[in-house]
Amino acid sequence: MIAAFAVAPVVLVTLLIGLRGVAAMRTTSDFLVASRRVSPLLNSAAVSGEYLSAASFLGVAGLVVKDGVGSLWYPVGFTAGYIAMLTLVAAPMRRSGALTVPDFAEARLASPSLRRLAAVVVLVISGLYLVPQFRTAGLVLSVVGGTPYWVGVVLAGVAVSATLALGGMRAATYVQAFQFVFKLLLFIIPAIWLLLEVGPTVREQAVHPVEFTEFERDTSVVFRVGATLDVPPGAAEIAPDGTRTALPPGEWQVPAGRTVVFPEGSPAPELRGETAPGAAGWERPLLDLRHEGYPLLSTWAVLIATMLGTMGLPHVIMRFHTSPDGRAARRTAAFTVALLSVFYLFPGIYGALGRVLVPHLYLSGATDSAVVALPAQVDTGATGTLFTGLLTAGAFAAFLATSLGLVLVVSGAISHDLVPGGLRQLRVAVVVAAAVVVLLALPAARLDAGTLVTWGFTVAASTFCPLLVLGIWWPRLTATGAIAGVTNGLLGSSGAFLVSLLDPPVDGWLAVLLVQPAPWSVPLAFVTMVGVSLFGRPPPWSTAAMLRLHLHENRSSLIADRAAVARDLGHSSWSARRSSAVRRITRRLVR
């Protein structure tokens, strides 16, 4: 019942706003970039709403519960990435006139092959980002409302596909801006209420954590996926008939779908391969990936992935193309930094309180639901139920806002970059993309949302970050160099993830660089692009293309026309003479 009252208004408002965008949907530009007429303030709210995904609203707090205070480096990287984007990417990308990242790649280097490769990268990044959104929607509804896992997954898919098919980017913009304000209020107000309600004892425990070793009250743990527990001597469970039954010490394979009620005072089992919340090092302000003992390397690895990955996220990049001009795009990025900074002050509160009040969630791998589980632990009456509903509504808004942008870029990659088509084909691609993600998310309940999203950031950092930075700031970049660099970055980062899933017998710093390859996959992509490009020759229109990216729009429009002529005339000697004329024109314009 809580889930129904919380989620239904969010879905209904999303669909109603989607209907508003129908009248303005006439062209591909309307569908993908809202005709480039979105103001900076509205756009920054929409970017923030789109960026604050399940990983931000629920995942960061869940990581703090499970892995400790060092997990707060994730939001530091998420927010700092926009500073790099503001400095290096926002305005030039808008001046490029492209609709998508693959569109920019071909416009800059005139390579259809690079465009298709970039479209494939968009699909990979979006898939890694979308699956955890739908997965967490199913998980949260199942925890709060007791519904089957698939209900939340399907509901998210239907709401997203219907909204985008009806209203495209314009509908997504208004939905995401509304949902940012909605999520911000529904994240801050419950956090303040929790701090006031828990009392000084819990606040003291949150600041001075101790290891979770026993249950402080009768606790029900739902294992939606199977788990391997190490049971200590003296552990017990409460049987269905209410009797206390001792558990045999040693390994315990808990099947999926099992609900175990642990009695008050029972020693807590340990999840195989994981450290209990509050254990030694939990309060250390550094990450320790896989508990390998290399916290500084782990922290830098995550920061590199999240900061540089933000610059390459295709759904964020597309947002800047909705701005009227480059100056508006830069202002959008600046406003976004401020809005995100406010939001990210609060995940640590939920994580620290979750370590005290719901540490048992780590046994079932459901720490992502700690945020929505907290109010019921503090107040079992109407007030607790109200705040549970509000947080559930905010969480579902987070899933929808991010999923809208991601499904939109997937449909653009398919119907604008891979198989060009019109408005109708874009709408069909939206529905098909949402259906495929639903099918991928249904068996993904056991996967960690934070891990998948970080992988998406790593792929973006290893592919689109070097492509955009060098494409915007280095005139000697060639199509061959760009293709080689993107390919190496994609294969290096994705290959490392696939190998880590096989759990190879490696440890120490090598294990850290395998589970988070950004420290080596990003430099690999940059070095490959630069090295291969130095052995080639940049296209003759490269200077004009660079000027178009960096000059004010009024000057760059003439340069763009001249560059297009030079590019279309190909490789003849006449084309070379023509490109010299273009360079003379651009020099006069600069003066």
Image: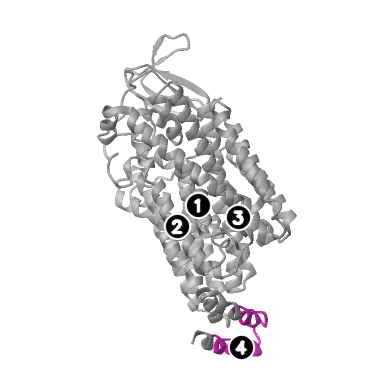
Which badge, 4 or 1, comes first in the chain's sequence? 1
Tell me which corner region of the image, top left, top right, bottom left or bottom right, holds residue 6. top right
Q: Is the magenta stretch mostly helix, strand or loop?
A: helix
Q: Identify the amino acid type marked 2.
A: Phe
User: Label 3, on which residue?
Assistant: 409
Mark 1 lies on residue: 45
The residue located at (56%, 53%) in the rendering is 124
Disc 3 from disc 2: Cα separation: 23 Å
Of 111 and 587, nearer the camera is 587
> Of callouts 3 and 4, which one flags the residue occurring earlier in the amino acid sequence?
3
The answer to whether residue 426 shows anywhere in this view is yes
Cα distance in 3D space between marks 1 and 3: 19 Å
SS type, badge 2: helix
Q: Nearer the viewer, mark 4 or mark 1?
A: 1
Identify the residue position indicated by label 2 in the image: 335
Are the residues at dot 2 and dot 1 in contact (C-beta closer than 8 Å)?
Answer: yes
Mark 3, mark 4: which one is toward the viewer? 3
The x and y percentages for residue 166 are 69, 48
Label 2 to label 1: alpha-carbon separation: 8 Å
**Which region of the structure is painted magenta?**
560-586
Q: Is residue 152 left or right of residue 475?
A: right
Q: Marks 4 and 1, how far apart in space?
A: 46 Å
Q: What element carries label 4?
A: helix
Of callouts 2 and 1, the N-terminal one: 1
